[in-house]
């Protein structure tokens, strides 16, 4: 388990390109300075959820906590933006630790593509033809044929993102589960997906791939014309997000389930 420092002295600042975030970056740099070395105690990310994902990807193997402040739109993974007492807020913040997925996709030419995903791995039809997919879990075929617009595998951290929009279940951040959620399923029409243990290896084979081409996306990394995609959690990688007390990711995920 990754250790979170009790005291933060070397704090790096990153910001998205939008004017609000850039203005905040200038003000916080003036007020607190900005560490520019390779070993920050924490990174403060100024922007929206997209920037948080980019920052987590950037520091994925570094065990460095990321504290987001919302200067974007949705900000589900971000804390409230305030300029006062930044170091004190970091010290009081509560960690939420999640693990990424690893996507291994084989394309029609036989090339293999690997990419990590913090939110989800998604498969999409590339043309007007619906995709035909076969789903296996740990080497056993569980669904011989799914006709759909696509399918996704979500982490708990990503379960309130695209997974929720596709009517997938919301998962508590510390649950040892992954959500397997179809996107606009046609047949079997009533299949709404599955909850899988996080140790599962999921294999999705594309049927009639030449006629019904499919792309695979790990967060923002896309591979087109895939014929097989394997997905599994990388439990050796800890991704650490920091949240203000009383506004933890656990609390946000719980609250999201009672919104209407």
Image (cartoon, grey):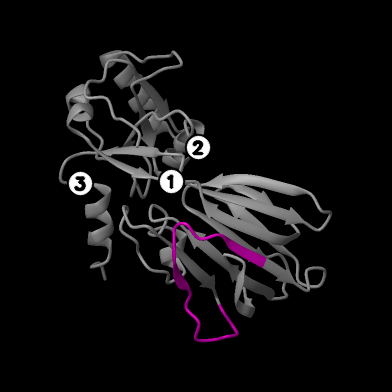
Label 1: how many Cα within 10 Å (few below 14, some 14–19, many 20+) = many
Give, as a single range, the part of the protein colored magenta.
Answer: 185-204
Give the labeled residue for mark 3: 247
First along the sequence among labels 1 and 3: 1
- Residue where numbered disc 1 is placed: 99
Distance from label 1 to label 3 (Cα)?
Answer: 20 Å
- Comparing marks 2 and 1, which lies closer to the viewer? 1
Q: Real-space Cα distance between discs 2 and 1?
A: 11 Å
Tell me the residue that label 2 is attached to: 57
Image position, residue 77 (x, y; %): 34, 46
Residue 113 falls left or right of residue 39? right
**Is 80 positioned to the left or the right of 35 in the image?**
left
**Residue 200 lies in the magenta-colored region:** yes
Disc 3 residue crowd, few under 14, some 14–19, many 20+, Cα 10 Å:
some
Determine the CA span between mark 3 and mark 2: 23 Å
Please identify the quarter of the rendering in which residue 207 is found: bottom right
Question: Dividing the image into 4 quarters, which one contains the C terminus?
Answer: bottom left
Q: Is residue 78 visible?
A: no
Disc with the residue nearer the chain's start (3 vs 2): 2
């Amino acid at each position: 388990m990754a250790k979170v420092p009790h005291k933060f002295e070397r704090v790096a600042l990153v910001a998205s390109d939008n004017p609000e975030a850039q203005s905040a970056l200038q003000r916080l740099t003036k007020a607190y300075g900005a560490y520019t070395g390779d070993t920050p105690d924490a990174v403060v990310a100024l922007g929206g959820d997209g920037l948080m994902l980019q920052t987590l990807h950037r520091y994925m193997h570094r065990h460095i906590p990321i504290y987001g402040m919302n200067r974007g739109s949705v900000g589900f993974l971000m804390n409230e933006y305030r300029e006062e007492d930044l170091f004190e807020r970091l010290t009081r913040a509560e960690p939420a630790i999640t693990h990424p997925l690893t996507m291994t996709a084989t394309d029609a030419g036989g090339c293999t593509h690997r990419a990590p995903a913090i939110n989800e791995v998604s498969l999409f039809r590339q043309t007007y033809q619906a995709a035909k997919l076969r789903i296996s879990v740990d080497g056993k075929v569980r669904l011989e044929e799914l006709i759909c617009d696509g399918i996704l595998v979500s982490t708990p951290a990503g379960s309130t993102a695209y997974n929720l929009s596709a009517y997938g279940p919301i998962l508590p951040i510390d649950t040892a589960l992954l959500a397997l959620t179809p996107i606009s399923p046609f047949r079997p029409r009533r299949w709404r997906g599955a909850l899988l243990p996080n140790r599962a290896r999921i294999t999705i084979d594309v049927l009639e791939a030449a006629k019904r081409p499919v792309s695979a996306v790990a967060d923002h990394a896309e591979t087109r014309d895939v014929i097989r995609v394997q997905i599994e959690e990388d439990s050796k990688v800890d991704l650490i997000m920091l949240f203000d007390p009383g506004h933890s990711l656990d609390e946000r995920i719980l609250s999201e389930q009672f919104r209407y």
